[in-house]
Image: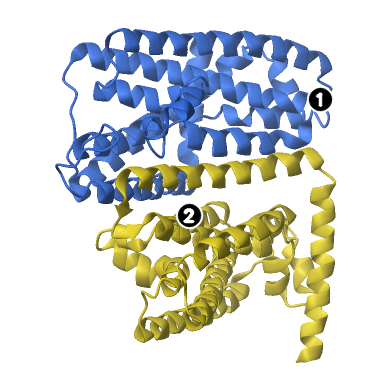
Protein backbone atom coordinates (compact mmCIF):
# COMPACT_ATOMS: atom_id res chain seq x y z
CA UNK A 1 0.00 0.00 0.00
CA UNK A 2 2.83 2.34 0.89
CA UNK A 3 4.48 2.00 -2.50
CA UNK A 4 1.23 3.00 -4.20
CA UNK A 5 1.03 6.02 -1.94
CA UNK A 6 4.49 7.01 -3.21
CA UNK A 7 3.37 6.47 -6.81
CA UNK A 8 0.41 8.75 -6.07
CA UNK A 9 2.73 11.41 -4.65
CA UNK A 10 5.18 11.19 -7.55
CA UNK A 11 2.37 11.29 -10.14
CA UNK A 12 0.87 14.35 -8.46
CA UNK A 13 4.24 16.12 -8.45
CA UNK A 14 4.93 15.05 -12.02
CA UNK A 15 1.70 16.70 -13.20
CA UNK A 16 2.70 19.89 -11.42
CA UNK A 17 6.22 19.75 -12.86
CA UNK A 18 4.81 20.40 -16.35
CA UNK A 19 2.74 23.36 -15.22
CA UNK A 20 2.13 24.92 -18.63
CA UNK A 21 1.12 21.64 -20.09
CA UNK A 22 -1.41 21.15 -17.33
CA UNK A 23 -2.72 24.74 -17.31
CA UNK A 24 -3.24 24.74 -21.08
CA UNK A 25 -5.05 21.40 -20.83
CA UNK A 26 -7.40 22.89 -18.25
CA UNK A 27 -7.83 26.02 -20.38
CA UNK A 28 -8.95 23.79 -23.24
CA UNK A 29 -11.58 22.24 -20.99
CA UNK A 30 -12.97 25.68 -20.20
CA UNK A 31 -13.14 26.57 -23.91
CA UNK A 32 -15.06 23.38 -24.60
CA UNK A 33 -17.55 24.26 -21.88
CA UNK A 34 -18.13 27.71 -23.44
CA UNK A 35 -19.62 26.26 -26.62
CA UNK A 36 -21.93 23.95 -24.70
CA UNK A 37 -22.92 26.59 -22.14
CA UNK A 38 -23.73 29.39 -24.57
CA UNK A 39 -25.49 27.08 -26.99
CA UNK A 40 -27.86 25.82 -24.31
CA UNK A 41 -28.14 29.24 -22.71
CA UNK A 42 -29.36 30.62 -26.07
CA UNK A 43 -31.76 27.73 -26.61
CA UNK A 44 -33.21 28.31 -23.14
CA UNK A 45 -33.01 32.12 -23.23
CA UNK A 46 -36.66 32.17 -22.19
CA UNK A 47 -36.55 31.09 -18.50
CA UNK A 48 -40.05 29.58 -18.72
CA UNK A 49 -39.23 27.44 -21.75
CA UNK A 50 -39.28 23.67 -21.33
CA UNK A 51 -37.90 21.49 -24.15
CA UNK A 52 -36.58 17.93 -24.23
CA UNK A 53 -37.87 17.56 -20.65
CA UNK A 54 -35.50 20.20 -19.26
CA UNK A 55 -35.95 23.77 -18.08
CA UNK A 56 -33.20 26.44 -18.09
CA UNK A 57 -31.99 25.63 -14.57
CA UNK A 58 -31.74 21.90 -15.24
CA UNK A 59 -29.95 22.20 -18.56
CA UNK A 60 -27.38 24.71 -17.25
CA UNK A 61 -26.84 22.55 -14.18
CA UNK A 62 -26.22 19.70 -16.62
CA UNK A 63 -23.56 21.81 -18.41
CA UNK A 64 -21.85 22.80 -15.17
CA UNK A 65 -22.16 19.25 -13.89
CA UNK A 66 -20.26 18.08 -16.98
CA UNK A 67 -17.26 20.14 -15.84
CA UNK A 68 -16.89 18.30 -12.56
CA UNK A 69 -17.84 14.86 -13.84
CA UNK A 70 -15.44 15.16 -16.79
CA UNK A 71 -12.60 16.12 -14.43
CA UNK A 72 -13.31 13.06 -12.31
CA UNK A 73 -14.04 10.51 -15.00
CA UNK A 74 -12.20 11.51 -18.17
CA UNK A 75 -8.90 12.70 -16.71
CA UNK A 76 -6.80 9.57 -16.75
CA UNK A 77 -3.17 8.65 -17.22
CA UNK A 78 -3.90 5.04 -18.24
CA UNK A 79 -4.01 6.39 -21.80
CA UNK A 80 -0.26 5.73 -21.89
CA UNK A 81 -0.62 1.94 -21.46
CA UNK A 82 -0.67 1.47 -25.24
CA UNK A 83 2.60 3.40 -25.55
CA UNK A 84 4.22 1.12 -22.97
CA UNK A 85 3.10 -1.94 -24.90
CA UNK A 86 4.10 -0.60 -28.33
CA UNK A 87 7.48 0.76 -27.24
CA UNK A 88 8.45 -2.20 -25.08
CA UNK A 89 8.54 -0.09 -21.89
CA UNK A 90 6.02 -2.52 -20.41
CA UNK A 91 8.94 -4.86 -19.65
CA UNK A 92 10.29 -2.34 -17.11
CA UNK A 93 7.06 -2.60 -15.14
CA UNK A 94 6.60 -6.36 -15.45
CA UNK A 95 9.88 -7.04 -13.66
CA UNK A 96 9.07 -4.67 -10.78
CA UNK A 97 7.38 -5.92 -7.59
CA UNK A 98 4.10 -4.16 -8.21
CA UNK A 99 0.80 -4.70 -9.93
CA UNK A 100 0.67 -2.95 -13.29
CA UNK A 101 -3.12 -2.34 -13.03
CA UNK A 102 -2.81 -0.88 -9.54
CA UNK A 103 0.09 1.27 -10.70
CA UNK A 104 -2.05 2.93 -13.41
CA UNK A 105 -5.08 3.07 -11.15
CA UNK A 106 -3.00 5.01 -8.62
CA UNK A 107 -1.71 7.36 -11.30
CA UNK A 108 -5.29 7.86 -12.51
CA UNK A 109 -6.45 8.77 -9.00
CA UNK A 110 -3.63 11.32 -8.68
CA UNK A 111 -4.58 12.86 -12.01
CA UNK A 112 -8.26 12.95 -11.06
CA UNK A 113 -7.48 14.59 -7.72
CA UNK A 114 -5.48 17.37 -9.35
CA UNK A 115 -8.01 17.87 -12.13
CA UNK A 116 -10.83 18.00 -9.61
CA UNK A 117 -9.08 20.78 -7.70
CA UNK A 118 -8.62 22.84 -10.86
CA UNK A 119 -12.10 22.06 -12.17
CA UNK A 120 -13.58 23.24 -8.87
CA UNK A 121 -11.74 26.56 -9.18
CA UNK A 122 -12.86 26.93 -12.81
CA UNK A 123 -16.39 26.02 -11.76
CA UNK A 124 -16.37 28.74 -9.11
CA UNK A 125 -14.89 31.38 -11.44
CA UNK A 126 -17.30 30.60 -14.30
CA UNK A 127 -20.18 30.45 -11.84
CA UNK A 128 -19.36 33.97 -10.64
CA UNK A 129 -18.89 35.32 -14.19
CA UNK A 130 -21.84 33.63 -15.91
CA UNK A 131 -24.21 33.54 -12.93
CA UNK A 132 -26.20 30.56 -14.23
CA UNK A 133 -29.29 29.28 -12.44
CA UNK A 134 -28.09 26.13 -10.68
CA UNK A 135 -29.87 23.24 -9.09
CA UNK A 136 -28.28 22.23 -5.77
CA UNK A 137 -29.16 18.67 -4.93
CA UNK A 138 -30.07 18.39 -1.24
CA UNK A 139 -31.29 14.79 -1.08
CA UNK A 140 -28.55 12.78 0.65
CA UNK A 141 -29.69 9.51 -0.96
CA UNK A 142 -29.43 11.02 -4.45
CA UNK A 143 -25.98 12.44 -3.69
CA UNK A 144 -24.88 9.00 -2.51
CA UNK A 145 -26.22 7.39 -5.71
CA UNK A 146 -24.44 10.11 -7.71
CA UNK A 147 -21.13 9.28 -6.00
CA UNK A 148 -21.61 5.56 -6.65
CA UNK A 149 -22.35 6.28 -10.33
CA UNK A 150 -19.15 8.38 -10.53
CA UNK A 151 -17.04 5.55 -9.09
CA UNK A 152 -18.57 3.14 -11.61
CA UNK A 153 -17.92 5.63 -14.42
CA UNK A 154 -14.27 5.93 -13.41
CA UNK A 155 -13.91 2.15 -13.40
CA UNK A 156 -15.59 1.79 -16.81
CA UNK A 157 -13.31 4.44 -18.32
CA UNK A 158 -10.21 2.88 -16.74
CA UNK A 159 -11.12 -0.52 -18.19
CA UNK A 160 -11.87 0.97 -21.63
CA UNK A 161 -8.47 2.68 -21.63
CA UNK A 162 -6.71 -0.53 -20.64
CA UNK A 163 -8.52 -2.47 -23.36
CA UNK A 164 -7.45 0.15 -25.91
CA UNK A 165 -3.94 -0.04 -24.49
CA UNK A 166 -3.95 -3.79 -25.17
CA UNK A 167 -4.49 -3.37 -28.92
CA UNK A 168 -0.77 -2.64 -29.60
CA UNK A 169 0.06 -6.18 -28.41
CA UNK A 170 -1.18 -7.22 -31.85
CA UNK A 171 -1.20 -4.01 -33.94
CA UNK A 172 1.34 -1.54 -32.49
CA UNK A 173 0.85 1.09 -35.19
CA UNK A 174 -2.80 1.80 -34.36
CA UNK A 175 -2.28 2.67 -30.70
CA UNK A 176 -3.06 6.37 -31.13
CA UNK A 177 -5.63 5.71 -33.87
CA UNK A 178 -7.77 3.52 -31.61
CA UNK A 179 -7.54 6.12 -28.82
CA UNK A 180 -8.62 8.82 -31.26
CA UNK A 181 -11.60 6.77 -32.40
CA UNK A 182 -12.78 5.74 -28.95
CA UNK A 183 -11.74 8.43 -26.46
CA UNK A 184 -11.75 11.50 -28.69
CA UNK A 185 -14.65 10.69 -31.00
CA UNK A 186 -16.96 8.05 -29.53
CA UNK A 187 -16.69 9.01 -25.85
CA UNK A 188 -17.16 12.71 -26.70
CA UNK A 189 -20.22 11.91 -28.79
CA UNK A 190 -21.96 9.18 -26.81
CA UNK A 191 -21.07 9.98 -23.20
CA UNK A 192 -23.36 13.01 -23.05
CA UNK A 193 -20.55 15.51 -22.61
CA UNK A 194 -21.93 17.72 -25.37
CA UNK A 195 -25.66 17.25 -24.86
CA UNK A 196 -28.02 15.05 -22.86
CA UNK A 197 -28.64 11.81 -24.73
CA UNK A 198 -32.41 12.08 -24.24
CA UNK A 199 -32.76 14.87 -26.80
CA UNK A 200 -32.24 12.18 -29.46
CA UNK A 201 -35.08 9.96 -30.80
CA UNK A 202 -35.91 7.00 -28.60
CA UNK A 203 -34.45 4.41 -30.97
CA UNK A 204 -31.07 6.15 -30.94
CA UNK A 205 -31.27 6.60 -27.16
CA UNK A 206 -31.89 2.88 -26.68
CA UNK A 207 -28.91 1.99 -28.86
CA UNK A 208 -26.59 4.43 -27.08
CA UNK A 209 -27.82 3.40 -23.61
CA UNK A 210 -26.92 -0.19 -24.44
CA UNK A 211 -23.24 0.84 -24.70
CA UNK A 212 -21.00 1.70 -21.70
CA UNK A 213 -20.42 5.29 -22.85
CA UNK A 214 -23.48 7.13 -21.44
CA UNK A 215 -22.59 5.73 -18.00
CA UNK A 216 -19.48 7.92 -18.04
CA UNK A 217 -21.12 11.38 -18.02
CA UNK A 218 -24.81 11.35 -18.89
CA UNK A 219 -25.97 8.85 -16.28
CA UNK A 220 -24.13 10.39 -13.26
CA UNK A 221 -25.35 13.92 -14.13
CA UNK A 222 -28.92 12.68 -14.59
CA UNK A 223 -28.70 10.97 -11.21
CA UNK A 224 -27.50 14.25 -9.64
CA UNK A 225 -30.39 16.14 -11.24
CA UNK A 226 -32.80 13.62 -9.73
CA UNK A 227 -34.13 12.67 -13.18
CA UNK A 228 -33.38 9.00 -12.58
CA UNK A 229 -34.87 7.64 -9.38
CA UNK A 230 -36.33 4.46 -7.88
CA UNK A 231 -36.17 1.33 -10.01
CA UNK A 232 -34.75 3.25 -12.97
CA UNK A 233 -31.83 4.33 -10.79
CA UNK A 234 -31.36 0.82 -9.47
CA UNK A 235 -31.49 -0.58 -13.01
CA UNK A 236 -29.03 2.03 -14.29
CA UNK A 237 -26.54 1.28 -11.52
CA UNK A 238 -26.95 -2.43 -12.21
CA UNK A 239 -26.18 -1.90 -15.90
CA UNK A 240 -23.09 0.16 -15.00
CA UNK A 241 -21.92 -2.58 -12.59
CA UNK A 242 -22.53 -5.15 -15.33
CA UNK A 243 -20.38 -3.15 -17.74
CA UNK A 244 -17.59 -3.06 -15.16
CA UNK A 245 -17.86 -6.84 -14.82
CA UNK A 246 -17.98 -7.49 -18.57
CA UNK A 247 -15.08 -5.13 -19.34
CA UNK A 248 -13.01 -6.49 -16.46
CA UNK A 249 -13.51 -10.11 -17.57
CA UNK A 250 -12.79 -9.22 -21.18
CA UNK A 251 -9.68 -7.25 -20.20
CA UNK A 252 -8.32 -10.17 -18.18
CA UNK A 253 -8.66 -12.50 -21.15
CA UNK A 254 -7.22 -9.97 -23.61
CA UNK A 255 -4.34 -8.98 -21.32
CA UNK A 256 -3.30 -12.59 -20.65
CA UNK A 257 -3.40 -13.37 -24.37
CA UNK A 258 -1.54 -10.13 -25.09
CA UNK A 259 1.26 -10.95 -22.66
CA UNK A 260 1.74 -14.26 -24.46
CA UNK A 261 2.36 -12.53 -27.80
CA UNK A 262 4.26 -9.57 -26.28
CA UNK A 263 7.76 -9.35 -27.74
CA UNK A 264 9.10 -6.13 -26.20
CA UNK A 265 10.33 -4.54 -29.39
CA UNK A 266 12.72 -1.77 -28.45
CA UNK A 267 12.43 -2.74 -24.81
CA UNK B 1 7.25 35.03 -60.24
CA UNK B 2 5.42 32.38 -62.33
CA UNK B 3 8.58 30.28 -62.38
CA UNK B 4 8.89 30.47 -58.62
CA UNK B 5 5.25 29.53 -58.17
CA UNK B 6 5.71 26.55 -60.48
CA UNK B 7 8.77 25.46 -58.49
CA UNK B 8 6.89 25.60 -55.16
CA UNK B 9 3.88 23.85 -56.62
CA UNK B 10 6.17 21.04 -57.75
CA UNK B 11 7.83 20.84 -54.31
CA UNK B 12 4.43 20.80 -52.60
CA UNK B 13 3.26 18.01 -54.91
CA UNK B 14 6.36 15.93 -54.17
CA UNK B 15 6.08 16.44 -50.41
CA UNK B 16 2.36 15.61 -50.53
CA UNK B 17 2.93 12.41 -52.49
CA UNK B 18 5.50 11.35 -49.86
CA UNK B 19 3.11 12.17 -47.06
CA UNK B 20 0.24 10.29 -48.75
CA UNK B 21 2.48 7.25 -49.26
CA UNK B 22 3.27 7.13 -45.53
CA UNK B 23 -0.43 7.19 -44.60
CA UNK B 24 -1.46 4.72 -47.30
CA UNK B 25 1.20 2.36 -45.98
CA UNK B 26 -0.69 2.16 -42.67
CA UNK B 27 -4.07 0.96 -43.87
CA UNK B 28 -5.53 0.20 -40.42
CA UNK B 29 -4.65 3.66 -39.16
CA UNK B 30 -6.11 5.23 -42.30
CA UNK B 31 -9.41 3.36 -41.86
CA UNK B 32 -9.62 4.19 -38.15
CA UNK B 33 -8.94 7.92 -38.57
CA UNK B 34 -11.28 8.21 -41.54
CA UNK B 35 -14.04 6.38 -39.66
CA UNK B 36 -13.49 8.63 -36.65
CA UNK B 37 -13.70 11.82 -38.67
CA UNK B 38 -16.85 10.71 -40.51
CA UNK B 39 -18.50 9.55 -37.28
CA UNK B 40 -17.68 12.81 -35.48
CA UNK B 41 -19.07 14.92 -38.32
CA UNK B 42 -22.20 12.79 -38.75
CA UNK B 43 -22.98 12.71 -35.05
CA UNK B 44 -22.66 16.48 -34.66
CA UNK B 45 -24.77 16.92 -37.77
CA UNK B 46 -27.44 14.66 -36.24
CA UNK B 47 -27.24 16.57 -32.97
CA UNK B 48 -27.88 19.90 -34.73
CA UNK B 49 -30.71 18.36 -36.72
CA UNK B 50 -32.51 16.99 -33.66
CA UNK B 51 -31.78 20.07 -31.59
CA UNK B 52 -33.32 22.34 -34.21
CA UNK B 53 -36.22 19.94 -34.67
CA UNK B 54 -37.06 20.53 -31.02
CA UNK B 55 -36.32 24.26 -30.81
CA UNK B 56 -37.30 25.48 -34.29
CA UNK B 57 -34.56 28.12 -34.35
CA UNK B 58 -31.47 29.29 -32.45
CA UNK B 59 -30.63 32.99 -32.05
CA UNK B 60 -33.02 33.75 -34.92
CA UNK B 61 -31.42 31.30 -37.35
CA UNK B 62 -33.40 28.46 -38.93
CA UNK B 63 -32.35 24.83 -38.99
CA UNK B 64 -30.90 25.06 -42.53
CA UNK B 65 -29.02 28.25 -41.68
CA UNK B 66 -27.43 26.72 -38.57
CA UNK B 67 -26.44 23.64 -40.57
CA UNK B 68 -24.89 25.89 -43.22
CA UNK B 69 -22.80 27.65 -40.54
CA UNK B 70 -21.63 24.23 -39.38
CA UNK B 71 -20.77 23.11 -42.92
CA UNK B 72 -18.83 26.31 -43.65
CA UNK B 73 -16.92 25.83 -40.39
CA UNK B 74 -16.06 22.30 -41.49
CA UNK B 75 -14.87 23.39 -44.94
CA UNK B 76 -12.40 25.84 -43.40
CA UNK B 77 -11.30 23.37 -40.74
CA UNK B 78 -10.87 20.37 -43.04
CA UNK B 79 -9.08 22.27 -45.80
CA UNK B 80 -6.66 23.92 -43.36
CA UNK B 81 -5.97 20.55 -41.72
CA UNK B 82 -5.40 19.00 -45.13
CA UNK B 83 -2.91 21.71 -46.08
CA UNK B 84 -1.25 22.40 -42.72
CA UNK B 85 -1.00 18.97 -41.05
CA UNK B 86 2.79 19.38 -40.89
CA UNK B 87 2.32 22.06 -38.22
CA UNK B 88 1.43 19.27 -35.77
CA UNK B 89 4.88 17.75 -36.24
CA UNK B 90 6.85 20.96 -35.83
CA UNK B 91 7.59 20.54 -32.12
CA UNK B 92 9.66 17.41 -32.62
CA UNK B 93 11.51 19.17 -35.44
CA UNK B 94 12.43 22.01 -33.08
CA UNK B 95 13.27 19.83 -30.08
CA UNK B 96 15.49 17.46 -32.05
CA UNK B 97 17.15 20.31 -33.93
CA UNK B 98 15.93 18.94 -37.28
CA UNK B 99 14.73 22.43 -38.17
CA UNK B 100 18.39 23.19 -39.01
CA UNK B 101 18.07 20.88 -42.00
CA UNK B 102 15.09 22.87 -43.22
CA UNK B 103 16.85 26.20 -42.80
CA UNK B 104 19.87 25.22 -44.91
CA UNK B 105 17.78 24.07 -47.88
CA UNK B 106 17.05 26.44 -50.80
CA UNK B 107 13.33 26.38 -50.01
CA UNK B 108 11.37 28.87 -47.94
CA UNK B 109 11.46 27.41 -44.41
CA UNK B 110 7.96 28.63 -43.54
CA UNK B 111 6.56 26.94 -46.65
CA UNK B 112 8.27 23.69 -45.68
CA UNK B 113 7.05 23.54 -42.08
CA UNK B 114 3.58 24.84 -42.90
CA UNK B 115 2.73 22.79 -45.99
CA UNK B 116 5.25 19.95 -45.93
CA UNK B 117 2.81 17.14 -45.12
CA UNK B 118 -0.65 17.34 -46.66
CA UNK B 119 -3.12 14.94 -45.03
CA UNK B 120 -4.82 12.48 -47.38
CA UNK B 121 -7.45 11.55 -44.77
CA UNK B 122 -8.75 15.12 -44.76
CA UNK B 123 -8.50 15.24 -48.55
CA UNK B 124 -10.87 12.25 -48.82
CA UNK B 125 -13.49 14.06 -46.73
CA UNK B 126 -13.40 17.33 -48.70
CA UNK B 127 -15.49 16.36 -51.81
CA UNK B 128 -18.56 15.05 -49.90
CA UNK B 129 -18.37 18.05 -47.59
CA UNK B 130 -18.31 20.48 -50.53
CA UNK B 131 -21.26 18.68 -52.17
CA UNK B 132 -23.29 18.91 -48.93
CA UNK B 133 -22.41 22.61 -48.56
CA UNK B 134 -23.46 23.34 -52.16
CA UNK B 135 -26.77 21.51 -51.63
CA UNK B 136 -27.56 23.53 -48.49
CA UNK B 137 -26.20 26.75 -50.05
CA UNK B 138 -28.46 26.43 -53.10
CA UNK B 139 -31.50 26.10 -50.83
CA UNK B 140 -31.07 29.79 -49.88
CA UNK B 141 -31.40 30.76 -53.58
CA UNK B 142 -28.42 33.13 -53.45
CA UNK B 143 -27.71 35.66 -56.18
CA UNK B 144 -24.48 35.27 -58.16
CA UNK B 145 -22.97 38.24 -56.30
CA UNK B 146 -23.72 36.56 -52.95
CA UNK B 147 -22.04 33.35 -54.10
CA UNK B 148 -18.97 35.30 -55.22
CA UNK B 149 -18.83 37.18 -51.91
CA UNK B 150 -19.17 33.85 -50.09
CA UNK B 151 -16.22 32.42 -51.99
CA UNK B 152 -14.15 35.58 -51.48
CA UNK B 153 -14.87 35.58 -47.73
CA UNK B 154 -14.10 31.86 -47.60
CA UNK B 155 -10.67 32.69 -49.07
CA UNK B 156 -10.38 35.45 -46.49
CA UNK B 157 -11.21 32.83 -43.83
CA UNK B 158 -8.41 30.60 -45.14
CA UNK B 159 -6.08 33.59 -44.99
CA UNK B 160 -6.92 34.15 -41.30
CA UNK B 161 -6.56 30.40 -40.60
CA UNK B 162 -3.14 30.46 -42.30
CA UNK B 163 -2.13 33.45 -40.19
CA UNK B 164 -3.15 31.51 -37.07
CA UNK B 165 -1.03 28.54 -38.11
CA UNK B 166 2.00 30.75 -38.84
CA UNK B 167 1.59 32.39 -35.42
CA UNK B 168 1.47 28.95 -33.80
CA UNK B 169 4.67 27.91 -35.59
CA UNK B 170 6.42 31.09 -34.49
CA UNK B 171 5.14 30.54 -30.97
CA UNK B 172 6.64 27.03 -31.06
CA UNK B 173 10.11 28.36 -31.88
CA UNK B 174 10.00 30.78 -28.96
CA UNK B 175 8.35 28.57 -26.33
CA UNK B 176 8.83 25.00 -27.65
CA UNK B 177 5.13 24.56 -26.89
CA UNK B 178 2.96 23.80 -29.90
CA UNK B 179 0.78 20.79 -29.21
CA UNK B 180 -1.51 22.65 -26.85
CA UNK B 181 -1.30 25.90 -28.85
CA UNK B 182 -2.63 24.22 -31.97
CA UNK B 183 -5.32 22.41 -30.02
CA UNK B 184 -6.34 25.66 -28.32
CA UNK B 185 -6.61 27.21 -31.78
CA UNK B 186 -8.91 24.36 -32.77
CA UNK B 187 -10.97 24.67 -29.60
CA UNK B 188 -11.40 28.40 -30.20
CA UNK B 189 -12.32 28.00 -33.86
CA UNK B 190 -14.76 25.23 -32.91
CA UNK B 191 -16.77 27.97 -31.20
CA UNK B 192 -17.57 28.94 -34.81
CA UNK B 193 -19.57 25.76 -35.36
CA UNK B 194 -22.53 27.94 -34.48
CA UNK B 195 -23.03 31.64 -35.36
CA UNK B 196 -21.16 33.89 -32.91
CA UNK B 197 -24.51 35.58 -32.21
CA UNK B 198 -25.23 32.84 -29.65
CA UNK B 199 -22.39 34.11 -27.45
CA UNK B 200 -22.71 37.00 -25.05
CA UNK B 201 -20.38 40.00 -24.71
CA UNK B 202 -17.43 40.22 -24.18
CA UNK B 203 -16.91 36.73 -25.68
CA UNK B 204 -18.87 37.68 -28.81
CA UNK B 205 -16.65 40.75 -29.37
CA UNK B 206 -13.50 38.72 -28.77
CA UNK B 207 -14.60 36.10 -31.29
CA UNK B 208 -15.42 38.75 -33.86
CA UNK B 209 -12.40 41.03 -33.68
CA UNK B 210 -9.59 39.71 -31.47
CA UNK B 211 -9.69 36.04 -32.43
CA UNK B 212 -11.75 36.56 -35.57
CA UNK B 213 -13.58 33.24 -35.65
CA UNK B 214 -16.77 35.07 -36.54
CA UNK B 215 -15.11 36.67 -39.56
CA UNK B 216 -13.26 33.50 -40.50
CA UNK B 217 -16.25 31.16 -40.37
CA UNK B 218 -19.47 33.03 -39.67
CA UNK B 219 -19.22 35.88 -42.15
CA UNK B 220 -18.94 33.75 -45.33
CA UNK B 221 -22.03 31.82 -44.23
CA UNK B 222 -23.90 35.06 -43.59
CA UNK B 223 -22.94 36.28 -47.08
CA UNK B 224 -24.83 33.46 -48.77
CA UNK B 225 -27.88 34.26 -46.65
CA UNK B 226 -27.70 37.92 -47.70
CA UNK B 227 -27.05 39.01 -44.11
CA UNK B 228 -23.89 41.01 -44.71
CA UNK B 229 -23.14 44.70 -45.34
CA UNK B 230 -20.40 46.22 -47.56
CA UNK B 231 -18.75 47.65 -44.42
CA UNK B 232 -18.68 44.14 -42.96
CA UNK B 233 -16.89 42.85 -46.07
CA UNK B 234 -14.28 45.65 -45.93
CA UNK B 235 -13.61 45.05 -42.22
CA UNK B 236 -13.30 41.30 -42.85
CA UNK B 237 -10.77 41.72 -45.64
CA UNK B 238 -8.85 44.28 -43.59
CA UNK B 239 -8.65 41.88 -40.64
CA UNK B 240 -7.58 39.07 -42.98
CA UNK B 241 -4.75 41.09 -44.52
CA UNK B 242 -3.62 42.54 -41.18
CA UNK B 243 -3.61 39.15 -39.44
CA UNK B 244 -1.42 37.74 -42.22
CA UNK B 245 0.91 40.74 -42.08
CA UNK B 246 1.41 40.45 -38.32
CA UNK B 247 1.75 36.65 -38.47
CA UNK B 248 4.59 36.94 -41.01
CA UNK B 249 6.29 39.64 -38.93
CA UNK B 250 6.02 37.40 -35.87
CA UNK B 251 7.45 34.43 -37.80
CA UNK B 252 10.46 36.51 -38.94
CA UNK B 253 10.97 37.68 -35.35
CA UNK B 254 10.73 34.10 -34.05
CA UNK B 255 13.39 32.93 -36.53
CA UNK B 256 15.87 35.34 -34.94
CA UNK B 257 15.23 33.60 -31.59
CA UNK B 258 15.85 30.07 -32.89
CA UNK B 259 18.75 28.58 -30.96
CA UNK B 260 19.11 25.25 -32.72
CA UNK B 261 19.01 23.33 -29.42
CA UNK B 262 19.85 19.60 -29.46
CA UNK B 263 21.30 19.74 -32.96
Q: Which residue is located at x 48 percent, y 77 percent? A: B243
Q: Which residue is located at x 24 percent, y 62 percent? A: B201
Label 2 vs label 1, nearer the camera:
2
Q: Which mark is residue A144?
A: none
Under circle 1, the secondary element is loop
Q: Foreground residue, A106 or A252?
A: A252
From the viewer's perspective, is A88 left or right of A243?
right
Residue A253 % position (x, y): 70, 9
Question: In the rendered structure, the residue with mark 1 lies on which chain?
Answer: A
Q: Which mark is residue A264?
A: 1
**Callouts 2 and 1 in the same chain:** no
Query: Cβ–Cβ below 8 Å for labels 2 and 1?
Result: no
Residue A163 % position (x, y): 64, 21
Residue A221 % position (x, y): 33, 26
Question: In the rendered structure, the residue with mark 2 lies on which chain?
Answer: B
Can the viewer see residue B224 in this picture?
A: yes
Q: Which residue is located at x 58 percent, y 58 percent? A: B132
The image quadrant where one finds the C terminus of chain A is top right
Q: Are there few (<14), some (14-19), or many (20+) residues within 10 Å of tag 1? A: some
Q: Vertical placement of A266 versus B217: above or below? A: above
Question: Which chain shows up in yellow?
Answer: B
Q: Vertical placement of A179 versus A33: above or below? A: above
Under circle 2, the secondary element is helix
Q: Foreground residue, A155 or B249?
A: A155
From the viewer's perspective, is A200 left or right of A4?
left
Q: Which mark is residue B184?
A: 2
Q: CA distance from mark 2 to mark 1?
A: 35 Å
- Chain A: drawing colour: blue
Can the viewer see residue B78 in this picture?
A: no
Amino acid sequence: MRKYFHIFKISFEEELAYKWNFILWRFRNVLQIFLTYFLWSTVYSDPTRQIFGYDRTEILTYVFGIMIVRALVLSAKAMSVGNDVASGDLSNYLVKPMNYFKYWMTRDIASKALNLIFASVEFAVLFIILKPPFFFQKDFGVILAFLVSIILAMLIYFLILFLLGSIPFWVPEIGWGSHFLVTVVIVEALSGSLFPINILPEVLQSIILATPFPYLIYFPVQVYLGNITGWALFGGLLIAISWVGVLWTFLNVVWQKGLKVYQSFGG
Amino acid sequence: MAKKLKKYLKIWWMMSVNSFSVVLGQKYALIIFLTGKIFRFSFFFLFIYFLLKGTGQIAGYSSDQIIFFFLTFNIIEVVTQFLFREVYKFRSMIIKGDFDLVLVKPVNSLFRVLMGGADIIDLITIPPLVILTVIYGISFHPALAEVLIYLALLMNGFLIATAFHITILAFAIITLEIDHAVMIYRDITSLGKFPVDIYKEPLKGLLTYLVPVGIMVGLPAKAIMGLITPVGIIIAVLIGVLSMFFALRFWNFALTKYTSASS
